[in-house]
Image (cartoon, rainbow, N blue to C red):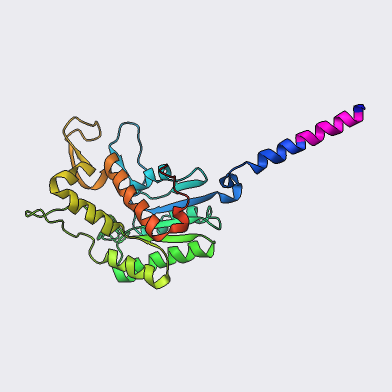
Amino acid sequence: MHRNTHSLTRWIAMLALLASVAHLPSTATASDAFTIFMIGDSTMADKPLIPENPERGWGQLLTLYFNPNVTIDNHATNGRSSKSFRSEGRWDGVLQRIQPGDYVIIQFGHNDEKSDQARHTDPFGSYTANLRRYAKEASELGAIPILATPVVRRVFDDKGVLQPTHGEYPEAVRKLASEIDVPLLDMTLRSRELLERLGKTRSEQLFIWTIPGEYDRFPEGNSDNTHFNALGATRMCDLAVAEIQAKVPELAAHLKSSR
């Protein structure tokens, strides 16, 4: 009798365990976990919050849009180009972490335009070659590379017309993405449309414009038409997510539901 009682207890425990497993949601498996790596410049980078800092990169907000099974590992760094990010060994650190099924978002351009030898690249020359190599090396490790064009700067002329400042770099990214058949987040197009819609005055609200004394780090105030405040970074991240939904549906499936 005592032995039968123990057997019955074990069966009840086993049935309870099986029932609990059967009711687990399908997203609760470890195999669904993956990482989105991000490499790029200051417009994408994580920015310190303390001491108080108005600046944010759009990659800093991306984790808020995805389900918990997705990890955002943002390696974008201020002032880096497609050339200097590799030459400083930053890409090596990313390569050591990539696992099959991960994603790598690649966005350079702002600093590739600079004239110094350490960072400058030619749009349809070394810039394209660098991006191609990043994509190839990510693919070889089983990751999915995603190319992104650079976000626009807020440069309006006297007539209120937004001026292009990236030359041929965005078009070089578009052509490469088509050639090697990888997803493209056209952040240049999306951000240009947003700034044109807002216009010269309202678009200032997305960038780091401060008055003297507002922030200790900008005692004289600041007029920055390249880098984003929290609102601007959020809006740019909105645009990136819209591009992911349109261009990378298998990744978009892991976005949080609005319901």
Q: Quadrant of residue 220?
A: top left
Locate residue 193, reporting x and y percent.
22, 55
Is residue 12 found inside the magenta-colored segment of the image?
A: yes
Q: Mark yes or no: residue 90 visible.
A: yes
Q: Nearer the viewer, residue 217 or 241?
A: 241
Quarter placement of the N terminus:
top right
Q: Would you say 216 lies left or right of 19 here?
A: left
Q: What type of secondary structure mainly makes up the magenta span?
A: helix
Locate residue 118, reporting x and y percent.
32, 59
Residue sitting farthest toward the left: 158
Magenta residues, start to end: 3-13
Locate residue 81, reporting x and y percent.
34, 57
Residue in the image at 43% along x and 66% along y: 133
Q: Mark yes or no: residue 110 visible.
A: no
Quarter placement of the C terminus:
top left
Residue in the image at 35% along x and 32% along y: 50
Q: Would you say 178 lies left or right of 33 here?
A: left
Residue in the image at 81% along x and 34% along y: 10
Q: Nearer the viewer, residue 257 or 44?
A: 257
Is residue 205 found inside the magenta-colored segment of the image?
A: no
Residue sitting farthest toward the right: 1
Above or below, 216 against 132 in this view is above
